[in-house]
């Protein structure tokens, strides 16, 4: 079995781990929506339209928080793809898809940040497809072929 770069492996793990607390903190927006929906007594002073507006702001904030998380979902794919490419026991094409997936995630974050209705553009539905192919491909490869045999 071929040695891979330990520094890239550490970088991959760090970038993946960074997204976890950001995701959990971002979930607070959804819990706040649930608080409004529960309709507790102290919310009765607000009109229905005000509560609906607050819910929409919280849901929009949640979506913006996902963009921050997606930066790290994309960044960890670059060292992961490199490691897959250099590993020698996984198909190199999966490593290429993972590295392209990094670019796709970052382009998606950029597009959704800069362009108001980015999701209306046809490319928005395909821009993260390389990441999907790479990640699912790795899972299928490991399930069907398995890890390399140590001899």
Image: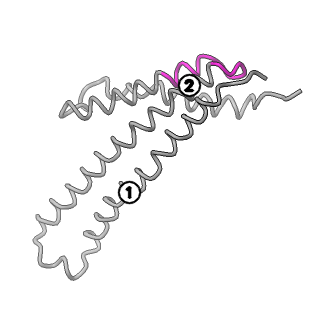
Magenta part, dominant SS = helix
What is the x, y in percent for residue 70? 39, 39
Estimate the spatial distance between the alpha carbons at disc 2 and disc 1, rounded to whole Å.
28 Å
**Few, some or many residues within 10 Å of mark 1 (<14, 14–19, 20+):** few
Query: Left or right: 41 with respect to 34?
Result: left
96 shown above or below 135: above
Q: Quadrant of residue 150?
A: top right
Query: Left or right: 115 with respect to 92?
Result: left
Residue displayed at 42% across by 56% down: 24
Residue displayed at 24% across by 57% down: 58
**Few, some or many residues within 10 Å of mark 2 (<14, 14–19, 20+):** many
Query: Left or right: 12 with respect to 126?
Result: right
Q: Nearer the viewer, residue 7 or 74?
A: 7
Q: Quadrant of the N terminus?
A: top right
Extreme right residue here? 151
Q: Circle 1 sits in a helix, a strand or a loop, which is it?
A: helix
Question: N-terminal of the two: label 2 or label 1?
Answer: 1
94 shown above or below 116: above
What is the x, y in percent for residue 77? 51, 30
Name the mark on residue 25: 1
Q: Circle 2 sits in a helix, a strand or a loop, which is it?
A: helix
What is the x, y in percent for residue 143? 71, 35
Residue displayed at 57% across by 32% down: 136
Residue displayed at 62% across by 25% down: 83
Query: Left or right: 107 with respect to 74?
Result: left
Mark 2 = which residue?
A: 81
Residue span colored magenta: 86-99
Q: Quadrant of residue 56?
A: bottom left
74 shown above or below 36: above
């Amino acid at each position: 079995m071929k040695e891979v770069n330990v520094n890239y492996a550490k970088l991959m793990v760090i970038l993946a781990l960074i997204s976890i607390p950001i995701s959990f903190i971002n979930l607070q927006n959804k819990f706040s929506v649930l608080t409004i929906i529960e309709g507790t007594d102290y919310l009765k002073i607000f009109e229905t339209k005000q509560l609906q507006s607050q819910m929409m702001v919280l849901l929009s904030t949640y979506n913006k928080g996902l963009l921050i998380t997606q930066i790290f979902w994309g960044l960890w794919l670059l060292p992961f793809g490199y490691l897959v490419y250099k590993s020698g026991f996984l198909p190199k094409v999966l490593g290429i898809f993972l590295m392209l997936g990094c670019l796709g995630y970052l382009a998606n974050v950029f597009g959704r940040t800069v362009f108001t209705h980015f999701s209306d553009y046809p490319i928005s539905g395909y821009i993260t497809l390389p990441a999907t192919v790479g990640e699912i491909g790795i899972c299928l490869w490991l399930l069907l072929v398995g890890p390399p045999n140590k001899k």
